Structures are given as structure tokens and as C-alpha cells.
């Protein structure tokens, strides 16, 4: 009697990596990665803003908290972003099924990214998925209220990720020229 061992399919050996963009800034990050033709990852966008979600180039889109926000966004209120993610966490979990690693991209300081990213990170990590947060902090001209919200969101997100990368948008001015406009600064942050 002989036993044949067949080599596994190549796809079985390759880790499944997902990148989920949460909120407006996260969605912009996903759009830039798709436009740059990044390959080998699953792109997912999750947002409370239905209009923004509908314009996304990502194939997988998750409408967060339709009952809470009615598709109108979180209004820069992290507590609404958090509640929205909790309302639809089952959709997020389904989208992440089979993932070995997830990158969560978000801008901190607004409503959806700040509130929903920690909820999504916790769901991923609770399922044994290696979870990495990649987030931005607001420009100083965006105000102290937004910066305080960002700092609180980062503290909460840190509890639920294996690694957290924080990119202060303000540092982009170090590589920009003195005549960079606000619009150009935000475009640099998206890239």
C-alpha cells in the first residue's frame, strides 16, 4: 500500500492580506493603493457616508451603521463612528474571513475613522488575525478639538492592534514647499 502526498496549491501557501480603509481618509488611502496598482491584497472600504462609499473603486464595500447614520456619515463624532461599527460588525467579520493579516487605514480626529477603527481592529484581532493600524493625525490647522479626538482614538486603537503606525500629517510640511496650499497638503496626506 502506498500513500501519495500531493503538494498544496500555491494559493494555499500564500497568506491572505486585507487592507480595510475606514472612514474618509481610509477610503482615500485605499483609492490611492488601487490607483497605484498594489497587488496581492484584498481591498475593503468601510464608511458611514454612503455617497463616499458608492464612489469607491474598491470591490468590497461595507456600509457602517445605516440605522444610526442613515448613510450620512458620523458628523465628526467618534461615538457615532463606534456605534456604527458595532451595529454592522458582522459584515466586517464576514469580509475578513480567511485573512491572515489586516491593515486598518484611517484618519484620526473625525468620526468614522476615529470611532470605528478600534472596533474593527478588535474584531480582527479577536479572530486571531495579525492586525496592524496605519493612521494619520490631523494637521495643526485642523484645530485642537480634532487633535484631542485623534489622540483619544489612537489610545483606544492601540489596545486592539498588534502594531500601530501613526503618521502626523503636520510632518508633510517638512517635505512640502512654502507655497503648499491646504488642498495640496490634504492631497499629500492621502498619498
Image (cartoon, grey):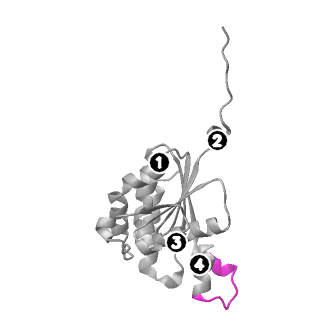
- Work out whether mark 1 precedes mark 3 in sequence or the reverse, and give the earlier one: 3
Foreground residue among 49 and 76 = 49
Residue topped by disc 4 = 170
Q: To which quarter of the image does residue 7 belong?
A: top right
Q: Which mark is residue 25?
A: 3
Q: To which quarter of the image does residue 171 belong?
A: bottom right
In the image, taking residue 83 as reference, residue 44 lies left or right, namely right
Residue at horizontal 54 percent and vertical 79 percent from the top: 139
Residue topped by disc 1 = 125
Distance of label 3 from label 4 (alpha carbons): 15 Å
How many other residues sit within 10 Å of disc 2, few (<14), some (14-19) or many (≥20)? few
Q: Position of residue 49 (x, y in %)?
A: 41, 72
Q: Position of residue 111 (x, y in %)?
A: 40, 71
Q: Nearer the viewer, mark 2 or mark 3?
A: 2
Look at the image and tell me in which quarter the C terminus lies.
bottom right
Disc 2 secondary structure class: helix
Distance of label 2 from label 1 (alpha carbons): 23 Å
Residue at horizontal 29 percent and vertical 67 percent from the top: 68
Residue topped by disc 2 = 11
Distance of label 1 from label 3 (alpha carbons): 22 Å
Disc 3 secondary structure class: helix
- Work out whether mark 3 precedes mark 4 in sequence or the reverse, and give the earlier one: 3
How many other residues sit within 10 Å of disc 1, few (<14), some (14-19) or many (≥20)? some
Disc 1 secondary structure class: helix
Disc 4 secondary structure class: helix
27 in the magenta segment: no
Amino acid at each position: 500500500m502506498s500513500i501519495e502526498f500531493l503538494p498544496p496549491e500555491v494559493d494555499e501557501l500564500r497568506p491572505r492580506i486585507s487592507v480595510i480603509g475606514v472612514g474618509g481618509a481610509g477610503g482615500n488611502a485605499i483609492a490611492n493603493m488601487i490607483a497605484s496598482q498594489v497587488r496581492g491584497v484584498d481591498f475593503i472600504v468601510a464608511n458611514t457616508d454612503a455617497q463616499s462609499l458608492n464612489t469607491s473603486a474598491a470591490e468590497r464595500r461595507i456600509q457602517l451603521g445605516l440605522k444610526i447614520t442613515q448613510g450620512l456619515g458620523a458628523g465628526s463624532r467618534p461615538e457615532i463612528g463606534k456605534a456604527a461599527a458595532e451595529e454592522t460588525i458582522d459584515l466586517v467579520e464576514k469580509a475578513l474571513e480567511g485573512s491572515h493579516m489586516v491593515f486598518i487605514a484611517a484618519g484620526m480626529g473625525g468620526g468614522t475613522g476615529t470611532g470605528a477603527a478600534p472596533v474593527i481592529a478588535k474584531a480582527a484581532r479577536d479572530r486571531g488575525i495579525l492586525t496592524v493600524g496605519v493612521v494619520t493625525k490631523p494637521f495643526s490647522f485642523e484645530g485642537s478639538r480634532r487633535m484631542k479626538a485623534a489622540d483619544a482614538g489612537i489610545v483606544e486603537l492601540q489596545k486592539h492592534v498588534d502594531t500601530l503606525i501613526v503618521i502626523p500629517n503636520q510632518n508633510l510640511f517638512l517635505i512640502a514647499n512654502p507655497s503648499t496650499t491646504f488642498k495640496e497638503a490634504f492631497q499629500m496626506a492621502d498619498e
